[in-house]
Image: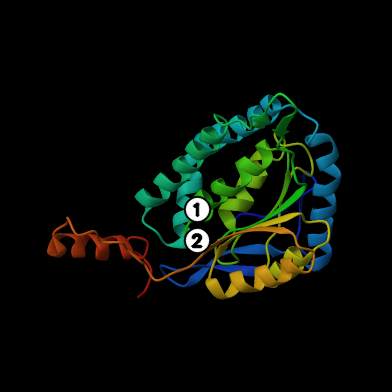
Amino acid sequence: MSDYKLLINGHMVDGATTMNVVNPANEETLAVCPRADEGQLNEAVAAAKAAFVSWSKTTMDERKAVISQIADVIEANGAELAQLLTQEQGKPLADATGEVYGTAAFFRYFTALDLPIEVLEDSETRKVEAHRKPLGVIGAIVPWNFPMILMAFKVPPALIAGNTVVLKPSPTTPLTSLRLGELIKDIVPAGVLNIVTDANDLGAPLTAHPDVNKISFTGSTATGAKVMAGAAGLIKRITLELGGNDAGIVLDDVEPKKVAQQLFDSAFQNLSLIHI
């Protein structure tokens, strides 16, 4: 079992306590994982807030260069990360490999985007422009089913836009995120990206933290409602991608018998090695 640690303010640190991560294929303990307490969460937020001052003043090209380096690291360690992802999450190795290299691809994709000045009005009497400015500290909460790729939907755009991030992976699949933190700790400036793990007890204090300016959450609808309620007190921005029940839209120009099997296969594609 590897020695996993939290990433807070550029340092790999032990959790306040520990928790076991279980291999779903055999239900045996895969690793002992650090578990942060609320004090460590507050340290991570404070580090992100402090780092925002300088990070937000860097150029977008400088920030993109960091994201590109992270993509390089993910690709260079792709086989290791894929194996770890399979062990903690249970998906077939081929799927885990695709997710890991897809994560690197999404990091690179976001470096191709820009935040141009939008001209809202350019008349004889006035010119109105919209300039996009970074918000501050972003709390990113990622679920168990696609821990790498869903992280890649949140972290790179936030960092490129000049924000700093506190990332909280699922307690059942925290290891790939922690390992990635270890791999990139010397690439990302201290405090710009922090990674803390919990036993589903730090979501509420992260969401309601007065120094967190936005929450990006992917998970269940029930938990999403709690995230919305927690953010409402400070009227902070939220992005919610909430769970459903494998909904599908079937148009009238398809063959029902053919598409039914495709919908079924798609619904269960991520459960191949998980007991059902």
**For numbered disc 1, what is the local secondary structure?**
helix
Tell me: residue 144, above or below residue 185: below
Q: Are marks 2 and 1 in contact (CB under 8 Å)?
A: yes
How far across and down, in percent of the image, does residue 76 sit?
Answer: 52, 34
Numbered badge on residue 30: none
Where residue 274 sits, quadrant-wise, is bottom left
Numbered badge on residue 88: 2
How far across and down, in percent of the image, does residue 260 sit?
Answer: 20, 65
Total numbered labels: 2
In three-dimensional space, the C-alpha distance between marks 2 and 1, rounded to whole angstroms, equals: 6 Å
Is 113 positioned to the left or the right of 214 in the image?
left
Instruction: Report crowding for label 1: few under 14, some 14 to 19, many 20 or more residues within 10 A (C-alpha).
Output: some
Residue hosting label 1? 84
Q: Residue at x 72, y 32 (%)?
A: 128
Instruction: Report crowding for label 2: few under 14, some 14 to 19, many 20 or more residues within 10 A (C-alpha).
Output: many
> Which amino acid lies under the numbered mark 2 shown in the image of this protein?
Glu
Q: Is there any visible trace of residue 61 in the rendered image?
A: yes
Q: Residue at x 57, y 31 (%)?
A: 111
Is 220 positioned to the left or the right of 102 in the image?
right
How far across and down, in percent of the image, does residue 90 sit?
Answer: 42, 62
Is 82 positioned to the left or the right of 184 in the image?
left
Q: Nearer the viewer, residue 138 or 46?
A: 138
Tell me the quarter of the image containing the N terminus. Answer: bottom right
How far across and down, in percent of the image, does residue 44 sit?
Answer: 79, 54
Is 246 positioned to the left or the right of 237 in the image?
left
Q: Nearer the viewer, residue 38 or 214?
A: 214
> Which amino acid lies under the numbered mark 1 shown in the image of this protein?
Leu
Q: Is there any visible trace of residue 199 in the rendered image?
A: no
Where residue 10 sits, quadrant-wise, is top right
**For numbered disc 2, what is the local secondary structure?**
helix
Q: Residue at x 75, y 46 (%)?
A: 135
